[in-house]
Image (spheres, helix red, strand yellow):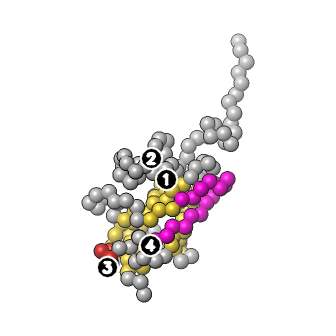
Amino acid sequence: MGCVIPPSLSVDNEDAGVNSPPAITAVRADDSELPEPGPVLFERGVGTMSIELVDTDLNDTLTVGIFVDYNFPDENPARATCTAKPSGKPQRTVTCDLIGLCQRADIGQTRNMTVVVFDREVKDSGSPAFQAMDPPGMKTSKFYFLQCKEPA
């Protein structure tokens, strides 16, 4: 018989950990958490959104994309994106600029808004469009009904 050496269980080594999906713990605007599923109201051309995230894969760079009517009728690119770099902690907060979230055609309409967090770089091509990642990329999302208005 031979000697059996157990594998390292340390999570400091990327090969030892199990890939886990990121999670969205809170989505806030104006220091208030957005109610799910809304509707949530934003002014065209202004504002920020703060997203609280958790990812136990401490070395992952997280990318947040805010999509409006992603599949209606075609896949549309994110109207806002932001990035949370590794911080050495599972909890991270990122702030997205919403200058392009609401467009003139959105005023007076109710749209579908999805906040998506990706744990890999989003590729310029591939499927699904504007959301493709290399394996073993994972994503998580939150859905809201979006209403837009002109700035006061």
Question: Horizontal placement of 92 versus 118: left or right?
Answer: right
Residue at the location (46% across, 71% down)? 98
Question: Which numbered dot is residue 75?
Answer: none
Taking the spot 69% from the left edge, 33% from the top edge, the residue there is 8
Earlier sequence position, callout 4 versus callout 3:
4
Q: Which residues are magenta?
A: 83-98
Residue with the most extreme bottom position: 152
- The amino acid sitting under disc 4 is Ile
Q: Position of residue 128 (x, y in %)?
A: 36, 49
Provide the residue designation for mark 4: 99
Asked whether residue 41 appears in the rendered view, the answer is no
On the image, numbered disc 2 is attached to which residue? Answer: 133
Between disc 2 and disc 4, whose residue precedes? 4
User: Judging from the image, what secondary structure is the residue with disc 4 in?
Assistant: loop
Dot 2 or dot 3: first in sequence order is 3
Would you call the spot at circle 4 few (<14 residues within 10 Å), some (14-19), or many (20 or more)?
some
Which residue carries the number 1 mark?
A: 118
The residue tagged 3 is 108
